[in-house]
Amino acid sequence: MTVFKAAVFDWAGTTIDFGSFAPMGVFVEAFARFGIQATIEQVRKPMGMPKWDHIQAMMADPEIARAWEARCGAKPDSAAIDKVYEVFVPMNEQVVADYATLVPGTRETVEALRAKGMKIGSTTGYTRSIMERVLPIAAKQGYEPDNLVCSDDLIEGRPGPLGMYKCFVDLAVYPPSAVIKVDDTEPGIAEGVAAGCMTVGVALSGNECGHTVEELAAMPQGAVDEIRQRVTAKLKAAGAGHVIDTIADLPALIERLERAPEA
């Protein structure tokens, strides 16, 4: 047994889709449908937010806003965000299954935590319709969390705490300090912080790193260390109490925390 009652995991970049690639090309293509050229950097910056909010954040980028006004004759507003969102969601539904491979160590970590008596929750910036494509593929690989909270399940998503509150209810776990939130994005970390959880960032499998397993393995160790330090600084600035490389490192962190809670 452990002092921790549950771990709540993000999906893309944390438990599936190493490097968080599924949404990238879709965002670029969705904006291209309206004659707007968005860069991967512009796409990755708001990652972790609900997808409508993500598009809203991209629309606030000065370059994209100017391009939209020049192309569409008006500054981007809620109706403009709706238009891109209506294109984005079905496109993401079509490709997300191709990126649903588990991050190495996910299944083993979940098994280790369940052996301690912990429940496994999940939240995501994806819509329910997108996650319906992911769940059966994850299950075939041995990952079936005890609950799922999607971006369109509640009136407000990340970085607010409502998704985590829903996890507390679904899993019947409390207090918040007994729940660990694990995420690769700043909004996802903020979600855990807002709910009062211990929050753990993952530095190398997620959006901020943006590399595949193979790409990281081919890099000099110094280059990987630089990425780790850069991403760790961002996640800690967002409120992460601890940062690990990937979900595979979580059991060892929990063991250290059980021995020395203030570590």
Image: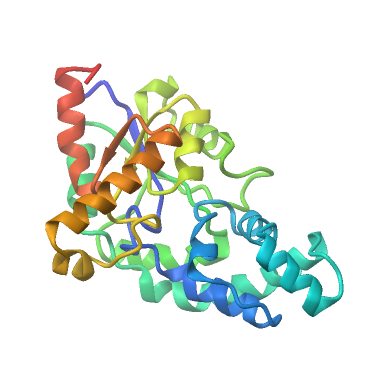
Determine whether 74 is above or below 104 in the image. Answer: below
Q: Quadrant of residue 81?
A: bottom right
Determine whether 146 is above or below 116 in the image. Answer: below
Q: How many marks?
A: 0
Residue drawn at x 17%, y 17% as measured from the top left? 260
Residue 87 percent coordinates (x, y): 66, 75
Determine whether 210 is above or below 120 in the image. Answer: below
Residue drawn at x 86%, y 75% as measured from the top left? 73
Return the residue nearer the eye: 107 or 84. Answer: 84
Residue drawn at x 21%, y 30% as measured from the top left? 254
Asked whether, in this view, residue 148 is left or right of residue 28, the answer is left
Residue drawn at x 66%, y 43% as measured from the top left? 156
Asked whether, in this view, residue 198 is left or right of residue 222, the answer is right
Residue 191 percent coordinates (x, y): 51, 37
Determine whether 122 is above or below 174 in the image. Answer: below
> The N terminus lies in which quarter of the figure?
top left
